[in-house]
Image (tube, rainbow, N blue to C red):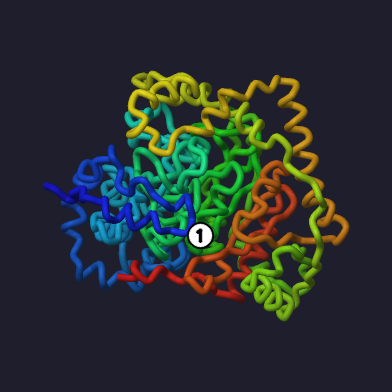
Amino acid sequence: MVLWEGYDETSEIAEQQKHEMDRMKYKLIQSKFLDKNEVFQKLYSEVANFSEERYQTLKPLILEKDIITLQKQIQNKVFTYEELTLFYLKRIYKYELNPETSLHTIIALNPTIVKEARERDKHRSQNNHPIYGMPILLKDNISTTNMKTTAGAFVLKDNLPKKEAFIVGQLKKNGALILGKVNLSEWAYYFCSGCPVGYSAIGGQTLNPYARKVFESGGSSSGSGTSIAANYAVAAVGTETAGSILSPASQNSLVGLKPTVGILSRSGIVPISHSLDTPGPMTKNIIDNAILLDAMLGKDVADESSISWKLDYKTVANNSFLKGKRLGVIKGLLNDSIYSETIKKLEANGAILIEFDPPKVGLPNFLTLLNLEMKEDLPKYISSYASENIEITDIPSVMSFNRKDSLQHMPYNQGIFDGIVADTTSVAGLEEVRAILLENGKTFFQKPIKENKLDAILSINNYHAAFAAVALHPCLTIPMGYKKSGEPIGITFIASPYSEAKLYELGSAFESLTKSRRIPEGYKD
């Protein structure tokens, strides 16, 4: 059965060249390699048998609802975990198999997901965590053993990992349902220079549901953002090195947490930098974000940065208030009208706002840190996790493979990989770079935090993500509103390391006050 037919996108691409932003001038939209029929046929009969009538009945009960609400309705036998799963699958099939609405965001679907959902219904008494039975999507650089893990790269198209990522095991242990894998910026946007965010050879060009081909999807966790914005699952897991959760969460009107490095394991995630990489939750609201984070927690002996850490997600909403909270306002951002109006609203509700100019420090040789660590970390991932049929061993072998058919494998070239190979910084030099970046990052945030006794600093989208990354500061972005064009914009709370609970409390109060998120117009049915 043919569910998807590729179409001639020549005129579409020609029209796209008129876009005012250079990296939105796409060279392609559809993947040249992913067979959508292969992805969608396996579950077709299950989805087809889920009636449109039942879907419409469940829509107001499921669409945009938080996990606590969903669990209560399942407990009250309004619907089942199986129906919840089929509801999301129905949406995926409806929108992703239509060329007019496809976001090119789904790379793989778990072939046993409906069977697993039935098992969750059968063993409902084992529900000890609110993530139990909730369908979750994963960025396709997170290893799973029943679905390939490609990082969006053609060279990894047949990579069926030997073992799953630690956080995947934690999710499954807590009863979550892994619905599928989503598109991303290839190699987590550390591959091609100046290329579109959300592009990968495997998945094609991820599109933003708020305006396909008009607004950027954000990256590199592009599919994690676009899929949840369109309500394809309860939540998704993204990964970040410096902005890769904050950017797509903001661009898709979502809540995205970049946690302190070490709170969540990185084992089994295709890496860039062991100093900065971290997975994180991407959701439609604060409580779901806290629940998903909690479901992934656990000390991983295979990850040297991993720690034992606990979060009482049940107190997030109960302890949320703005009165008396001291929040740092970056003066240079006040020329943004939405940020400025938001600051006034926070002040009117009791927050104490302190305007400041950040310390004038830079991030010298930031790319050197990423270059040298990816050069070191990628071979380790391939050795420990990649399937035996994967012949590449390091960055040079990936580049050599890509050159065999550069138009297909790297239409935007592989400029960042060129830079990685060319970087000859010594081990001692790298240590110096790392130390300077850490110190400058801490100065950038800790100086104003300590001088003004701040609970958090307020930024926009991923504007200060690199400083937060090198300083190991957690960031929480939350929908702040929409520009006149309709493009989403997020406010980002940045706090001291291991302050995730404080960020959630502030975020919950902000969310209750503003209620900014709106579902994309074209994805309401």
Q: Quadrant of residue 173?
A: top left
Q: Circle 1 sits in a helix, a strand or a loop, which is it?
A: helix
Vertical arrangement, residue 436 with respect to residue 395, above or below = below
Q: Is residue 178 visible?
A: no
Taking the spot 81% from the left edge, 47% from the top edge, the residue there is 443
Mark 1: give few (<14), some (14-19) or many (20+) Cα within 10 Å: many
Taking the spot 49% from the left edge, 56% from the top edge, the residue there is 21
Q: Locate residue 34, reporting x and y percent.
A: 28, 40
- Disc 1 target residue: 251
Which sits in the foreground, 177 or 3? 3
Q: Is residue 15 visible?
A: yes
Left or right: where 222 falls relative to 436: left
Q: Locate residue 377, reporting x and y percent.
A: 56, 26
Left or right: where 155 falls relative to 36: right
Taking the spot 59% from the left edge, 41% from the top edge, the residue there is 241
Q: Quadrant of the C terminus?
A: bottom left
Q: Residue furthest right?
A: 451
Q: Residue furthest bottom?
A: 348
Q: Locate residue 91, reporting x and y percent.
A: 29, 60
Q: Quadrant of residue 435?
A: top right
Q: Locate residue 417, reporting x and y percent.
A: 52, 29
